[in-house]
Image (spheres, rainbow, N blue to C red):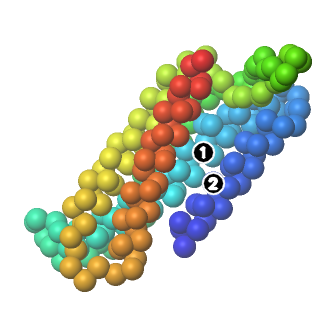
């Protein structure tokens, strides 16, 4: 159920992101939307979605594979507390970024040629003064989280009597992780140009 809520939250975040690019807001509203989207909503929605996958994969690993206590069940409250810890990290990083590296809405003029006509395409985008800091703080531990989940997916790949849930979870991990990694790299490369 949490994955469905996190997906809805992510779609809501993307809706806000699209709004700020296609509608002109006053400067204050644009800055608030940029910081809310990039500093808070996107990282938290990613953590809700991928963190849920991480704790479910960790539970599978502990039940079937863990070398110290195989077969040991992990209570839901421990998994939720780990997810709350990850979200708390997002909140702390968001506070730090809003204070020290705030986003602003900038307009980029891109020249374009169509036939004999030359015209400008105006793209509104959120930018900060130090995009490497955004990339490092927002995506650094998320990259480590994705790597940990990939390792857990590899370790739990040979579970006997795999159910549809474990197979679909591994498929989700194998499809989402490269997509998210490519998105992080594309965001970084676009933000430094």
Q: Position of residue 42 (x, y in %)?
A: 60, 45
Is residue 77 in view from this perspective? no
Residue furthest front as drawn: 115
> Is residue 145 rendered to the left or right of residue 1?
left
Query: Which residue appears at 49% of the width and 51% of the height?
Result: 47
Q: Circle 2 sits on which residue?
A: 10
Tag 2, which secondary structure?
Answer: helix
Please name whichever residue, 27 or 148, is drawn nearer the observer in this view of the structure: 148
Q: Residues within 10 Å of mark 2 (few under 14, many from 20)?
A: many
> Which numbered marker is on residue 99?
none
> Is residue 25 rendered to the left or right of residue 146?
right
Q: Position of residue 12 (x, y in %)?
A: 71, 54
Distance in Å between CA atoms under marks 1 and 2: 7 Å
Q: Is residue 164 above or below residue 21?
A: below
Q: Position of residue 129 (x, y in %)?
A: 61, 16
Q: Position of residue 21 (x, y in %)?
A: 79, 35
Query: Which residue appears at 21% of the width and 61% of the height?
Result: 155
Query: Which residue appears at 35% of the width and 73% of the height?
Result: 166
Instruction: Name which of mark 1 and mark 2 comes first in the sequence.
Output: 2
Tag 1, which secondary structure?
Answer: helix
Image quarter where the C terminus lies is top right
Q: Circle 1 sits on which residue?
A: 42
Circle count = 2
Please name whichever residue, 97 or 143, is drawn nearer the observer in this view of the structure: 143
Q: Quadrant of residue 58?
A: bottom left
Q: Is residue 7 above or below residue 69?
A: above
Q: Quadrant of residue 119?
A: top right
Marks 2 and 1: in contact by CB < 8 Å?
yes
Please name whichever residue, 83 or 138, is drawn nearer the observer in this view of the structure: 138
């Amino acid at each position: 159920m949490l994955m469905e809520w996190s997906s809805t939250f992510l779609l809501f975040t993307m809706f806000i992101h699209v709004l700020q690019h296609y509608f002109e807001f006053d400067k204050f509203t644009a800055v608030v939307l940029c910081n809310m989207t990039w500093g808070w909503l996107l990282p938290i929605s990613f953590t809700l979605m991928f963190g849920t996958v991480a704790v479910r994969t960790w539970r599978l690993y502990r039940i079937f594979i863990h070398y110290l206590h195989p077969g040991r069940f992990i209570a839901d409250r421990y998994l939720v507390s780990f997810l709350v810890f990850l979200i708390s990290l997002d909140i702390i990083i968001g506070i730090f970024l809003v204070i020290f590296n705030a986003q602003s809405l900038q307009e980029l003029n891109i020249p374009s040629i169509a036939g004999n006509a030359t015209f400008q395409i105006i793209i509104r985008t959120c930018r900060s003064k130090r995009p490497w800091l955004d990339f490092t703080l927002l995506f650094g531990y998320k990259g480590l989280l994705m790597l940990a989940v990939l390792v857990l997916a590899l370790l739990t790949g040979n579970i006997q009597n795999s159910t549809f849930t474990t197979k679909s979870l591994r498929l989700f991990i194998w499809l989402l992780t490269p997509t998210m990694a490519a998105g992080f790299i594309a965001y970084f490369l676009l933000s430094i140009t």
